[in-house]
Image (spheres, rainbow, N blue to C red):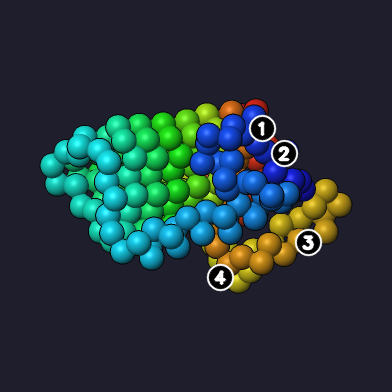
Amino acid sequence: MKFEIDYYFEEIQKDELFYKLTSGKNKVLEIFDSSAKIIDEIEKSEKQEIHTDKIQENVKIMGNVYIGEGTQIEAGCIIQGPVYIGKNCKLMYHSYIRPGTVLGDNCVVGFSTEIKHTLMREGSKVSDLAFVGDSIIGKNSRIGSGVIVANRGFNQEEIVVKDENKQPIKLGREFMGVIIGDNSRIGANCTTSPGTFIGKFTWIY
């Protein structure tokens, strides 16, 4: 089991939001703490800061949000703040963005897909009819249609994973979905268990 940021993500440019989230951090789970600070700032702003006019009919935006330039929001979408959505993203019909979500630039959320408390790095995509919760998705990674990222155990207790020696490691989190590195893919209709870690350049069929 690897927890180092470099194992999952590479070539983090200074102009990326992800650079701000990972600066000074060594462990991948620490990124959640950084994204929480951005969400807290949006919540404290007590406003909707929307820099795009590409919003179709019947879109519902609730709470405090930041939405960047050029982002397309198609009909029937629901955005429930606090959330951060970067530039030139595409939220397809009836997608649902729940609180605590941070989308980098050029991300895509598919038709009727639900994203909750998740960080999507620049250029990543979650396809149609999927659920992703409490996760971090690497640059240019893809989550296929119908994928379910389970984010809570049956016992509803702290999530425990095992290292390469099959020794238990407590994550200190009751909710935890998947960490998926850069340029990786999860194929259609897969389901991941709570606390799944997937390295970069990995394809799951």
Residue 182 appears in which quarter of the rendering?
top right
Is the C-beta separation of discs 3 and 2 under 8 Å? no
- Disc 3 or disc 2, which is closer to the eye? 2
- Disc 4 or disc 1, which is closer to the eye? 1
Residue type, numbered disc 1: Glu
For image coordinates 27% across by 55% down, the residue present is: 48
Is the C-beta separation of discs 4 and 3 under 8 Å? no
Is the C-beta separation of discs 1 and 3 under 8 Å? no
Residue tagged 3 = 168
Q: Earlier in the sequence, mark 1 or mark 3?
A: 1
Residue 111 in sight here:
no
Identify whether 100 is placed above or below 67.
Answer: below
Residue type, numbered disc 4: Gln
Q: Residues within 10 Å of mark 2 (few under 14, many from 20)?
A: some
Q: Is residue 123 left or right of residue 74?
A: right
Query: Horizontal and vertical percent for residue 84?
Result: 40, 49
Q: Earlier in the sequence, mark 4 or mark 2?
A: 2
Q: Residues within 10 Å of mark 3 (few under 14, many from 20)?
A: few
Per the rendering, the mark at residue 10 is 1
Residue tagged 4 = 156
- Disc 4 or disc 2, which is closer to the eye? 2
For image coordinates 72% across by 64% down, the residue present is: 170
Query: Horizontal and vertical percent for residue 86?
Result: 39, 40
Is the C-beta separation of discs 1 and 2 under 8 Å? yes
Residue tagged 2 = 6
Q: Earlier in the sequence, mark 4 or mark 3?
A: 4
Q: Secondary structure at mark 1?
A: loop
Q: Residues within 10 Å of mark 1 (few under 14, many from 20)?
A: few
